[in-house]
Image: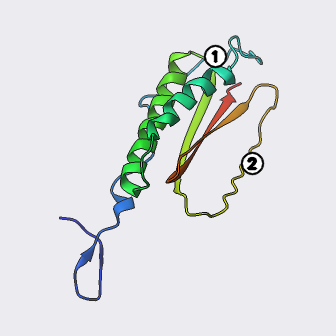
């Protein structure tokens, strides 16, 4: 049975954005022994990830903005980015991938993020895709685990 808010006429209203969690977890996390290593053996390479990210963001093609369809494509892109980054085996990096999709209606958009991190080891990159119907922005944060 679907539970939701009851409207004026007694009909249960569905919230299309509350159908399932949009956060994905990777499963069991292995415990790592302390190595006392302060620098990565294999550093995160942003330009490699940027190239793959642009290719994945192109998945929107000439899609028109429909919230549910765009949400599914955004989740798929984020999942594929995470899988690609994991396959690169960057040493001791935790990555966060966020894909935001919005309808273009002539509005201005400003985005900002702040983080407390080590600028020598941690990095981020931003991807953008735009067509006449929508704007998609992807952000990848790579944080080194000491």
How far apart marks 2 and 1 lie (CA) works out to 24 Å
Residue pictured at 66% horizontal, 58% vertical? 109
Residue 95 as seen in the image, left or right of residue 146: left
Precedes in sequence: disc 2 or disc 1: 1
Based on the displayed image, in which of its 4 quarters is residue 16 positioned? bottom left
At numbered mark 2, what does the secondary structure look like: helix, strand or loop?
A: loop
Residue pictured at 52% horizontal, 28% vertical? 55
- Residue 41, compared with residue 2, is above or below; it is above
Q: Which residue is outermost to the left?
A: 1
Label of residue 77 in the image? none
Residue 94 in the image: x percent, y percent? 61, 29
In front of the other: 58 or 93: 58
Picture quarter with the C terminus: top right
Asked whether disc 2 touches disc 1, contact meaning CB atoms under 8 Å apart, the reply is no
Residue pictured at 56% horizontal, 16% vertical? 88
At numbered mark 1, what does the secondary structure look like: helix, strand or loop?
A: loop
Q: How many marks?
A: 2
Picture quarter with the N terminus: bottom left
Residue 32 in the image: x percent, y percent? 58, 20
**Residue hosting label 1:** 91
Mark in the foreground, 2 or 1: 2
Based on the displayed image, in which of its 4 quarters is residue 96 positioned? top right
**Residue 25 in view, yes or no:** no
Q: Residues within 10 Å of mark 2 (few under 14, many from 20)?
A: few
**Residue hosting label 2:** 114
Based on the displayed image, in which of its 4 quarters is residue 104 positioned? bottom right
Residue 38 as seen in the image, left or right of residue 74: right
Residue 120 in the image: x percent, y percent? 82, 26
Is the image coloured rainbow, by chain, by secondary structure, or in one colour? rainbow
**Residue 7 in view, yes or no:** yes
């Amino acid at each position: 049975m679907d539970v939701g808010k009851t409207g004026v006429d007694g009909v249960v209203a569905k919230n299309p954005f509350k159908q399932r969690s949009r956060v994905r977890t990777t499963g069991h996390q292995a415990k790592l022994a302390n190595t006392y290593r302060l620098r990565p053996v294999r550093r995160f390479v942003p330009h490699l990830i940027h190239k793959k990210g642009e290719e994945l963001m192109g998945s929107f093609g000439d899609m028109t903005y429909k919230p549910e369809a765009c949400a599914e494509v955004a989740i798929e892109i984020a999942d594929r980015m995470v899988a690609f980054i994991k396959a690169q085996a960057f040493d001791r990096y935790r990555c966060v991938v966020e894909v935001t999709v919005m309808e273009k209606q002539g509005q201005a958009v400003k985005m900002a993020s702040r983080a407390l991190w080590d600028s020598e080891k941690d990095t981020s990159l931003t991807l953008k895709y735009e067509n006449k119907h929508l704007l998609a922005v992807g952000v990848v944060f790579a944080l080194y685990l000491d």
